[in-house]
Image (cartoon, grey):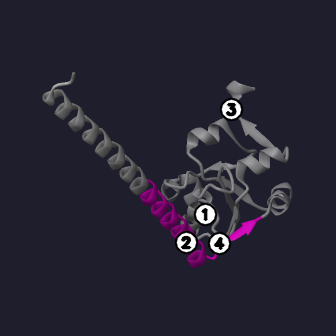
Amino acid sequence: MPTNKSIVLLSAAIVVAGATFWGYQAYAKHEAAQRQIADQKMIQSIEAFSAKTKISFLSLPEAYSLYSQKKAVFIDARPDRDFQYYHIKNAISGPYDTAKYNPQLVAMDKNQIVVAYCSSEKCPMAEILATTLREMGFQRVFVFSGGMKEWGQAGYPVQRAEILE
């Protein structure tokens, strides 16, 4: 037969376990809400950038037309390691977070048509890069939002790391 002491200890353990469980549930809900707020703020920030800079978006056929006619320079907004792995053929690596300091971009003709892209339509890096390019004085900036995913799926020209070929 259980003693009073064991009943008290068992009761205390059940209370602590219940409180821990409910506390965790509340914490998880709070964290999910915080992530949702952060995601919404990021989306609002991107939309504000787009409205402010009047970024123009290109469809895959439009981007390919500029590419095939050699009327634009394509700039990959992804980190250099992603660029090295796989990128649109003849594109320039211009990671969005270091574009202002990229000597190749700084030296470019600011009237040249440039097309920023990243990995896919869900990637915000191309829009951020386009905004930076506008701030740098580029006049004809576009974003190909389909990115490498759409370009690659279409079978358009790409360059891969030599080690993989």
Secondary structure, mark 1, is helix
For the residues labelled 2 and 1, the Cα–Cα distance comes to 8 Å
Left or right of 1? Residue 122 is right
**First reached walking from the N terminus: tag 2 or tag 3:** 2
Q: Which residue is drawn at the image coordinates 14% and 30% (left, top)?
A: 4
Local packing at callout 3 (Cα closer than 10 Å; few below 14, some 14-19, many 20+) is: few
Mark 2 vs mark 3, CA separation in Å: 33 Å
Neighbourhood count class around disc 2 (C-alpha, 10 Å): few under 14, some 14–19, many 20 upward? some
> What is the C-alpha distance between the residues marked 3 and 1?
25 Å
- Which of discs 4 and 3 lies nearer the camera? The answer is 4
The foreground one among 59 and 64 is 59
Counting residues from the start of the chain, the first of labels 4 and 1 encountered is 4
Question: Are the residues at dot 4 and dot 1 in contact (C-beta closer than 8 Å)?
Answer: yes
Q: Exactly how many numbered labels are in the figure?
A: 4
Q: Residue at x 55, y 51 (%)?
A: 95
The amino acid at mark 2 is Phe
Q: Earlier in the sequence, mark 4 or mark 3?
A: 4
The residue that label 4 is drawn on is 55
